[in-house]
Amino acid sequence: MTIADLLHVLRKHIVTAATAFVVIFVAVAAFTFLSPPKYTATAELFATYSGQSDGSQNSNEMNSGASYLSTQIKTYPQLIKTQAILQPVIDDLSLNMTVKDLADMVTATNPTNTFMVDIAVEAGDAQQSAQIANSVSKNLAKQISSTLYSDDAAKSPIQLSVVQEAQTPTEPSSPKVPLYLAAGLILALIVAVGAALLRDVLNTKVDGVDDAKALTGASSLGTVPRSALMEEHKPVVISEPSSREAEQIRRIRTNISFLSPNTNDHGHLVVITSTEPSEGKTTVSVNVASAIAEEGKSVLLIDGDLRHPSVARVMGLEGHVGLSHILSGQASPRDIVQQYWKPNFHILPAGKRPGNASILLNSAIMAELIDQALTQYDYVILDTAPLSVANDAAIFGKQADGVVMVIGKGVADKKELQSTVEALHTSEVPLLGFILNLADPKKITSSNYYYYEEGASSQGRGHRAAKSRDKRH
């Protein structure tokens, strides 16, 4: 993963990353500032070796003594935590604690290549830490120097001398606020990045335009927000022409107009499909067709999803008779095509579900129907079955020089979408672009919206919007 990929993941899951960062950093900060202060006092002792002979020591004896001292001094960190050393300290200072409690407060270390012993005591009271450190050091020196042997007449060859008494600390040794906060900051950053990466790995659904672009390699034709207005039985450009949702549909209409060059002798076939059901392709098809008709173009919207007809239901039309009757020779287009909203906007419902939908849609009658419609309409919008259900869109896509994919945010599966795009590529059907549906309204940029005068009729407002767009484009 490159740095650019990492930044993309962080930007996509910025809420998750920010939440994880704040939680970890606040937890570390709370621990830092709420922890009671502790003070550390340190006393230093120096160990010497003196032989048993009365005369001066020779070099061999000195080397042997140094080796013996080095071996013994390494045991002092464990020896200092024993009852023999600590119980006298508790009695001397009248401490209200056990030997185990005191052992947890005391630490002895032997600096490398020295005969020094450092005794550090960490306590909640600064003065008490110094008192305990001095008492422990004196008791250790006494024990090592005088009671190493059971025979009192024998002199211990090791002598411990206190060379530096512990002083009362003036500042707490813990918590170390700058260090803890710096560590918390680093930890919070690591957790935030990890949370974003984990969220991205676990999220198998398309989460936005960037995901769709990366998976399809196609351009975005627009974004449709998740909205209750899109669920009504009337296109949003008709029911709420001044709404934000209507504006997004008009932007998609403008982008679709650039997919094919303008010609006077032949209309444009726009095949709209999706990878899976429930991504909202029919809702998008209905609204896009309505927006094109609003602009004054002649439009025929065909419900080509014979397996699951939806156009008539979404638009609130009678749909018992439709395309399936034409393809089976039971009716002619003149008898079935319905006018909707404007004289230039016609609907061809799917009709009843046939048992041989694939054969009917791939028939010569269907191809002839589309060819004939393209000579009569500026745009023919064909709503087809999802590609995970049938391959109809790929067949019609060759006739239309490509397909338009509706991708439902949080619905489309990443692997399924990638497989669909690969299948289209194998079939040599271009993906002209995608429309992200069910998007978060808050993440859609808001600019250049259309504004209408209060009290104006829907038709008049539509004409003024068209004039406004003509001026801008």
Image (cartoon, rainbow, N blue to C red):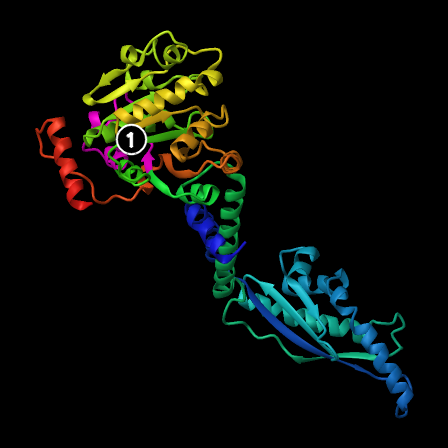
Q: Residue 239: say if magenta.
A: yes
The residue singled out by tag 1 in the image is 267
Residue 410 x/y as whole percent: 44, 34
Give the quarter of the figure containing the C terminus: top left
In this rendering, position of residue 73 left or right of residue 61:
left
**Location of residue 126 (image quadrant):** bottom right
Q: Position of residue 70 (x, y in %)?
A: 81, 76
Residue 452 position (above or below residue 374):
below
Q: From the viewer's perspective, is residue 39 above or below residue 234?
A: below
The structure residue drawn at horizontal position 72% and vertical position 73%, both measured from the top left corner, is 110
Which range of residues does the magenta coloring cover?
A: 223-250
Q: Is residue 385 visible?
A: yes
For this view, does 318 lie left or right of residue 452?
right
Question: Residue 308 is drawn in which quadrant?
Answer: top left
Whether residue 229 is situated above or below residue 78 in the rendered picture: above
Residue at x 18% of width, y 41% of height = 469
- Extreme residue toward the front, this view: 265
Q: Nearer the viewer, residue 391 or 235?
A: 391
* Extreme-bottom residue of the structure: 56
- Residue 31: x, y in percent? 50, 54
Q: Which residue is more in the foreground, 6 or 90?
A: 6
